[in-house]
Image (cartoon, rainbow, N blue to C red):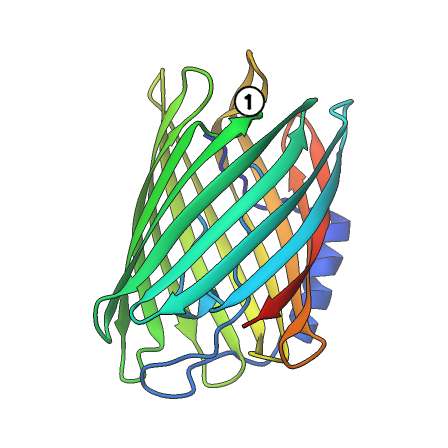
Amino acid sequence: MKTNYLGFSPKIGLLALASLALALAAHGQENTAEVDPPQASLQDTQTAAPVEPAPGKILNNFLESGSSYETLSNGFGYWAGGYVRAVASQGKNTWNAEINGQREFGDAGVYGAAGDTYTFNSDWYGALTLGSSVGGFFWPRLRVDSFLNRKWAARKQFITTLGVGYDVAKDVHRDHTAFIGTAYYFDGPWIVEDGVHFNVSNPGTAFSASGFVAVTQGRNKQHYLTLNVGFGQEAYQLIGPTTVLSRFPSQTASVTWRQWLGKNWGFNFVTDFYHSPFYRRGGGSFGFFRDF
């Protein structure tokens, strides 16, 4: 279905350079089996592709709420919405849940998802997430994502990820996805990640692929700054109940800033940009979180 990955324009290029200048330190593991948990990736409001998980990419035990607004070119109007998400750990399980209300392309709906990341042992962990929606032709009727992750090297600072997913749209489209990715945790306060998503959409057996590179800088209880860029193909994109854009390239870029203002609370700010042959989109989201 929708596989948005990162657009480049002079404005985005300047933003990327500025973000990288701020981010030239590193985020790595503090010891053999544990890393500072960096910024959790915000789920794309288009449910474009599975959120790439890494052991430190899940912030444990927090509640967050916020809103988003984005403008689109070529008469496509605006997107707006709000979200609530929570993550809680217990033993070997890290549970997560999210409710996201969104208005896109003149329609509105609510998407909900819940999942668990389970630690099998010091080397292996996996994740499973299920989601569905009410209203909003652009939300999936059903979405399932699963990942299996392996830690490598002496400090277990290198992680490889394999994932599969299934997406049932509210029209006739169905998507089967696969993901391959890596993450490396340096000795300083930063992480570098990359990955490739493969997608087969039916009817028509349309194949698409997209990739991304992400850099995160910061430390837990201080701040995290993440720059994510990429590009790829989209098999199709719903812009109306019966209107589909199909087989076209797209690019996206996003910067996420998670800042602690106190010991257990702070804000999360995301700005993102999207470009395709049909329209451009720009905007972001802002929310407050509290650790517990």
Q: Position of residue 178 (x, y in %)?
A: 32, 42
Query: Where does label 1 land, which residue?
Result: 137
Image quarter of residue 39: bottom right
Density class for disc 1 (Cα within 10 Å; few <14, some 14-19, many ≥20) is: many
Q: Tell me: 32 left or right of 4.
A: left
Q: Tell me: 46 left or right of 266.
A: left
Q: Where is residue 109 in the image (x, y as percent from the top left)?
A: 60, 29
Q: Foreground: 107 or 196?
A: 107
Image quarter of residue 225: bottom right
Image quarter of residue 197: top left
Q: In the rendered view, would you say 4 is above or below 94?
A: above
Question: Residue at the location (58% across, 42% down)?
Answer: 100
Question: Residue at the location (40% across, 68% down)?
Answer: 89
Question: Residue at the location (47% across, 69% down)?
Answer: 60
Assign the C terminus to one quadrant of the image: bottom right
Assign the N terminus to one quadrant of the image: top left
Q: Tell me: 151 left or right of 199.
A: left
Question: Residue at the location (66% across, 25% down)?
Answer: 278
Q: What residue type is labelled 1?
A: Phe
Q: Foreground: 242 or 9?
A: 242
**SS at mark 1?**
loop
Q: Foreground: 103 or 250?
A: 103
Q: In the rendered view, would you say 25 is above or below 84?
A: below
Q: Foreground: 141 or 292?
A: 292
Q: Can residue 9 be seen in this view?
A: yes
Q: Position of residue 243 (x, y in %)?
A: 57, 13
Q: Is residue 44 visible?
A: no
Q: Position of residue 13 (x, y in %)?
A: 71, 55
Q: Tell me: 127 left or right of 232.
A: left
